[in-house]
């Protein structure tokens, strides 16, 4: 776990249950090794509260995918919200429907069965989330439009939101707010069957309220400073 990360907060991190005995620990490590081997065959990288790649633990519950690694700085907002705020392991994978459609079909049809929600980001003519919604009728797909190019994300937003009937994509806001909200929305979907994630969502909401209260406490001074 990277405790020096700026988005890490002690209150937001939730311990993964520790192995009770050496034999149990050995079994867990074997399981982690199997997960890592399967993921690297499919060009995915596991990220969890403990770390990235070989340092990560657990089975991924969310796929965070994007059309290009140029989308990664934006999508780290989603990845870090999942891992640091909600303790949710995710699989991160590049999937380009415009450069290698066949590999997208292969990756998406062969996701680990632990994946229950998909977050997909793209910019421009953003067909990735819609294509994934068609490939995976069984999983919710959340789209994040990237603010990119001449149209600054309006093109990606409209490409994602105007899906024909039958293959829904839950589209978030353009850019960083959308990336963070995608992670929160994924956590809410997982929380339906996971009380621990529900609890973390409530803690997250509390932190937002504390922020407003503290802004009110310093408001008078700021009004004086601005006058
Ligand atoms: C989209 O094209 C990607 O999702 C990215 O947002 C955009 C530009 O990709 P690069 O040219 O930076 O690889 O498919």
Image (spheres, rainbow, N blue to C red):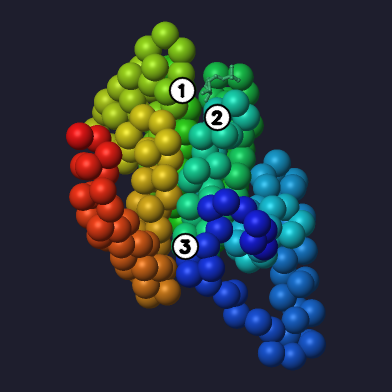
Q: Calculate the distance from the C-alpha at mark 1 to the C-alpha at mark 3.
A: 26 Å
Whole-percent x and y of residue 148? 46, 18
Q: Which element carries disc 2, helix, strand or loop? A: helix
Farthest top residue? 150
Of residue 39 and residue 53, the one placed in the foreground of this image is 53
Q: Quadrant of ligand 1?
A: top right
| Residue 50, image quadrant | bottom right
Q: Residues within 10 Å of mark 1 (few under 14, many from 20)?
A: many
Q: Quarter of the image containing the N terminus?
A: bottom right
Cβ at disc 2 under 8 Å from ligand 1: yes
- Contact (Cβ within 8 Å) of mark 1 with mark 3: no
Q: Which residue is mark 2?
A: 71
Relative side of 143 to 223, left or right: right
227 sits left or right of 173 in the view: left
Q: CA distance from mark 3 to mark 2?
A: 22 Å
Which residue in the protein does label 3 denote? 86
Q: Which residue is mark 1?
A: 123
Where 151 falls versus 140 (above or below)? above
Position of 14 relative to 173 (above/below): below
Looking at the image, is mark 3 or mark 2 earlier in the sequence?
2
Query: SS class of the residue under badge 3?
Result: helix
Label 1 CB less than 8 angstroms from ligand 1? yes
Q: Nearer the viewer, mark 1 or mark 3?
A: 3
Badge 1 marks a residue whose secondary structure is loop
């Amino acid at each position: 776990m990277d405790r020096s990360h700026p988005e890490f907060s002690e209150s937001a991190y939730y311990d993964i249950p520790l192995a009770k005995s050496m034999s149990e620990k050995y079994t867990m490590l074997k399981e982690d090794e199997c997960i890592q081997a399967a993921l690297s065959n499919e060009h995915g990288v596991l990220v969890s509260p403990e770390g990235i790649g070989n340092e990560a633990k657990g089975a991924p519950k969310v796929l965070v995918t994007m059309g290009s690694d140029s989308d990664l700085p934006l999508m780290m907002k989603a990845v870090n919200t999942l891992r640091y705020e909600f303790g949710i392991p995710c699989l991160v994978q590049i999937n380009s429907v415009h450069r290698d459609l066949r590999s997208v079909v292969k990756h998406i049809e062969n996701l680990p069965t632990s994946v229950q929600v998909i977050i997909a980001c793209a910019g421009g003519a953003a067909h990735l989330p819609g294509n994934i919604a068609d490939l995976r009728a069984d999983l919710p797909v959340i789209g994040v439009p990237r603010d990119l190019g001449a149209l600054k994300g309006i093109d990606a937003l409209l490409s994602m939101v105007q899906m024909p009937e039958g293959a829904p994509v839950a589209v978030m806001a353009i850019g960083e707010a959308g990336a963070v909200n995608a992670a929160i929305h994924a956590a809410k979907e997982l929380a339906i069957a996971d009380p621990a994630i529900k609890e973390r969502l409530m803690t997250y909401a509390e932190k937002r309220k504390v922020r407003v209260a503290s802004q009110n406490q310093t408001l008078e001074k700021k009004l004086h400073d601005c006058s």
